[in-house]
């Protein structure tokens, strides 16, 4: 496990591209390293404002958080995890990032995996979040004590024209540690990619473990850093 930057855990089936909530402050959020990194990146960023903001420039106080995709809002999908301090109303508009705890998940409790629009920002209420998808279909579900990630080929991704897959990420962050996952890829045709990724949405650093459909017996690894 690497210590170049903080990492969030992502499980991906394919490579794919309001109510007000109180700012969460659960039991183990005190991580000055992560807060300092966010502030440093915000100060050093050459990007002006939140990329796709309808308001122009940085996000307004009414929608203070700039999401990873560059939009302004105030719910967990904007303020948690991949929130960009550089485009937000203020560097501290982004919610604090919860530190990792020991976790062994056998996926027996379906309530621990929630869609991003139902996540309240408190990691003690959920271990995994299903990222927002262009589709309205539930592409990530728990069945037979397994987390099943689906690729829906009937619906078309509005940007790529391909099928719509699922992305599930952890609700906690870590700097270093030991991670183990048991994965099974269901695809043996070219195109789909099954992945387990360690990534920092703040800095973009990542470590990838990928299985491509055309060669399901071979695990590929990549890493990127700034």
Image (cartoon, grey):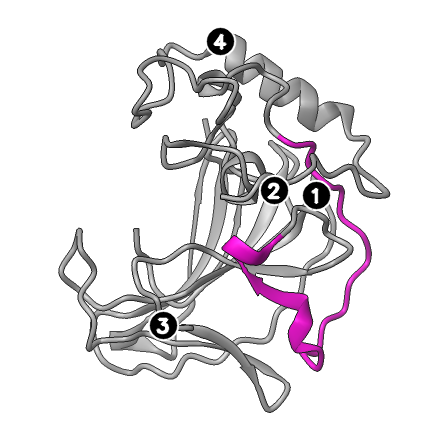
Label 3, label 1: how many angstroms apart (C-alpha)? 30 Å
Q: Which quadrant does the C terminus fall into? A: top left
Label 4, label 3: how many angstroms apart (C-alpha)? 39 Å
Q: Which residue is mark 1?
A: 174
Identify which residue, 82 or 188, lies in the foreground. 82
Check the image and report above or below for 97 versus 39: below
Tell me, yes or no, whether the two marked residues, 1 and 2, touch with CB atoms within 8 Å: yes
The label shown at residue 44 is 4
Of the image marks 1 and 2, the number of the one nearer the N terminus: 2
Task: Name which residue lies at 33% across and 19% down.
Answer: 55
Badge 1 element: strand
Residue that lies at the very extreme toward the right in this rendered image = 27
Q: Give the image location of residue 59, x and y in percent.
A: 43, 20
Check the image and report above or below for 49 versus 6: above
Task: Name which residue lies at 78% across and 63% down.
Answer: 103
Of the image marks 4 and 3, the number of the one nearer the N terminus: 4
Q: Give the image location of residue 24, x and y in percent.
A: 73, 39
Q: Is the residue marked by circle 2 packed among few (<14), some (14-19), or many (20+) residues within 10 Å? A: many
Badge 2 element: strand
Q: From the viewer's perspective, is 214 left or right of 120?
A: left
Identify which residue, 144 or 24, lies in the foreground. 24
Q: Which residue is mark 3?
A: 137
Of the image marks 2 and 4, the number of the one nearer the N terminus: 2
Q: Is the residue marked by circle 4 packed among few (<14), some (14-19), or many (20+) residues within 10 Å? A: few
Q: Which residue is mark 2?
A: 7
Check the image and report above or below for 169 versus 68: below
Label 2, label 4: how many angstroms apart (C-alpha)? 20 Å
Identify which residue, 80 or 42, lies in the foreground. 80
């Amino acid at each position: 496990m690497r210590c170049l930057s903080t990492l969030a855990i992502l499980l991906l089936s394919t490579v794919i591209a309001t109510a007000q909530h109180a700012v969460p402050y659960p039991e183990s959020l005190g991580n000055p390293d992560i807060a300092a990194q966010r502030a440093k990146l915000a100060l050093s960023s050459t990007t002006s404002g939140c990329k796709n903001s309808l308001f122009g420039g940085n996000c307004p106080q009414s929608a203070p958080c700039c999401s990873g995709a560059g939009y302004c809002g105030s719910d967990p999908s904007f303020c948690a995890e991949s929130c960009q301090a550089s485009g937000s109303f203020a560097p501290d508009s982004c919610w604090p990032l919860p530190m990792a705890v020991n976790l062994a998940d056998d996926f027996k409790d379906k309530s621990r995996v929630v869609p991003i629009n139902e996540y309240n920002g408190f990691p003690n209420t959920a271990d995994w979040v299903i990222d927002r998808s262009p589709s309205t279909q539930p592409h990530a579900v728990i069945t037979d004590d397994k987390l099943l990630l689906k690729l829906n080929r009937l619906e078309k991704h509005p940007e790529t024209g391909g099928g719509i897959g699922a992305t599930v990420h952890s609700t906690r962050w870590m700097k270093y540690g030991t991670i183990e996952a048991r994965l099974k890829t269901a695809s043996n045709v070219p195109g789909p990619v099954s992945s387990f990724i360690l990534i920092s949405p703040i800095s973009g650093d990542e470590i990838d473990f990928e299985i491509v459909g055309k060669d399901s017996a071979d695990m590929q690894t990549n890493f990127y850093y700034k």
